[in-house]
Image (cartoon, grey):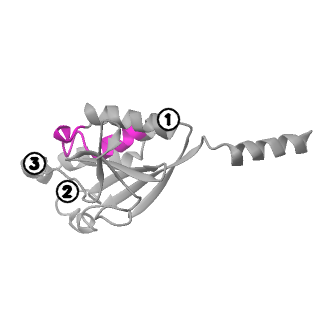
Amino acid sequence: LLRTCLTLCRYLVVANPTRYNVQLYIYDLSRGMARSLSPIMLGVWGCMHTAIVAYGDEFFFGGEGISSCSPGGTMLGPPDTVVELGETEVSEEIFMDYLSSLGESTYRGDRYRLFEHNCNTFTNEVAQFLTGRPIPSYITDLPSEVLSTPFGQILRPILDSIHIAPPGGNVINGGRNM
């Protein structure tokens, strides 16, 4: 009976195509400069851009809205770090409908704000939708850490005008890639 149960469990895990791996790609946009300057000015160790990788594609949010590309396919190149977020049973079709809905409302390009509504906000929301778990807090806490410093407050007007949109992605709108 135990052998039959193990065989059945192995079959369900291997043959069940409804489970998809979900990863978080982390890029340091400062390429290490933030870590070098951190003790002097900002008190942070990086300027993080994040993306969700699922269903064979990388999904991210920037000044153009929600975009997708092949994993590591933006001009940023390969990620600095990959975090395994777990698996999802959400189908690709449902996920794409979800992204389309977000892209038409909450995550339109004109809603991008470097500190309050950015790629990390997007990946955190999508990670919770797919896996039920958030992305690491050391990423989501970065904006408040920067703004809590005097230098961060001085730079805020300049930084607020920045809209990060890594080139190389396809903007997702209305449920289809454009």
Residue, disc 3: 161
Residue matched to label 1: 132
Q: Is 98 displayed left or right of 1 in the figure?
A: left
Q: Which residue is mark 2?
A: 42
Q: Quadrant of residue 27?
A: bottom left
Whether residue 118 is in magenta: the answer is yes
Q: Work out which quarter of the rendered image holds the N terminus and state it.
A: top right
98 or 151: which is nearer to us?
98
Q: Which residues are magenta?
A: 108-126
Give the image location of residue 49, x and y in percent: 30, 54
Image coordinates of residue 152 in percent, x first then y, are 14, 51
* Residue 106 shows in the view: no
| Mark 3: few/some/many CA within 10 Å (<14, 14-19, 20+) | few
Q: Secondary structure at mark 2?
A: loop
Instruction: Using the image, determine if residue 29 lies above or below residue 154.
Output: below
Q: Amino acid at mark 1?
A: Gly
